[in-house]
């Protein structure tokens, strides 16, 4: 299974909402895709990140870093070619990453 599908399925399995995938291959030398989602609360966000990490490891992918903790409304998981952002509450609207990268293509993954 490819990493993008693994990440999106993990988010969906843990009830992450409004999954957005931005193709960064033409603008970023560091990652290929940015995946953004929302969680209802911090506990759910931590659960999503934990599931992404577990499933990535299960399929042989490495996690470079996880930023954020049980007090964060924005948790990031860096999987080298994919960076996933999990937002809680209004943080997603505050940082508005989708608008920052509005000119980059969006993708859909069939789960």
Image (spheres, rainbow, N blue to C red):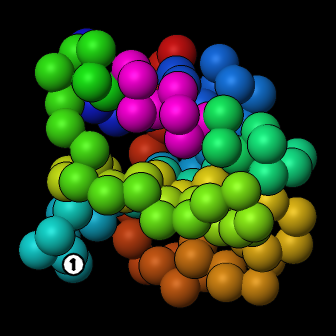
For image coordinates 67% across by 84% down, the residue present is: 95
Q: Quadrant of residue 36?
A: bottom right
Instruction: Tell me which residue sits at (59%, 72%) in the image.
Output: 98
Q: Main secondary structure of the magenta part?
A: helix
* 102 displayed left or right of 54: right
Please name whichever residue, 71 or 6, is drawn nearer the observer in this view of the structure. Answer: 71
Q: Is residue 97 above or below residue 24?
A: below
Q: Secondary structure at mark 1?
A: loop
Q: Which residues are magenta?
A: 48-55
Image height check: is 4 above or below 37? above
Residue at 53% x, 85% y: name it.
100
Give the answer, above or below, for where 75 lies relative to 61.
Answer: below
Q: Position of residue 42 (x, y in %)?
A: 79, 52
Residue situated in front as seen by the camera: 7 or 49: 49
Q: Looking at the picture, tell me which residue is in the foreground, 51 or 103.
A: 51
Image location (x, y in percent) of residue 89: 88, 64
- Quadrant for residue 58, please give it: top left
Position in image of residue 86 (x %, y %): 63, 55
Q: Quadrant of the N terminus?
A: top left
Which residue is pictured at 41% across the width and 23% down the height? 54
Q: Residue furthest left?
A: 29
Question: Which residue position is annotated with label 1?
Answer: 27
Which residue in the rendered view is the most extreme toward the front?
Answer: 70
Q: Is residue 17 visible?
A: no
Q: Is residue 3 visible?
A: yes
Q: Alpha-carbon neighbours of circle 1 within 10 Å: few (<14), some, or many (≥20)?
A: few
Q: Position of residue 102 (x, y in %)?
A: 52, 77
- 77 part of magenta stretch: no
């Amino acid at each position: 299974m490819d990493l993008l599908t693994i990440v999106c399925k993990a988010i969906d399995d843990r009830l992450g909402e409004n999954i957005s995938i931005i193709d960064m291959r033409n603008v970023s030398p560091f990652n290929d895709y940015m995946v953004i989602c929302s969680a209802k609360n911090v506990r759910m966000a931590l659960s999503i990140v934990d599931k992404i990490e577990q499933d990535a490891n299960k399929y042989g992918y490495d996690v470079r870093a996880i930023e954020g903790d049980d007090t964060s409304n924005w948790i990031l998981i860096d999987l080298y070619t994919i960076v996933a952002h999990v937002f809680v509450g209004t943080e997603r609207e505050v940082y508005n990453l989708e608008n920052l990268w509005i000119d980059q293509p969006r993708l859909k993954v069939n789960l």
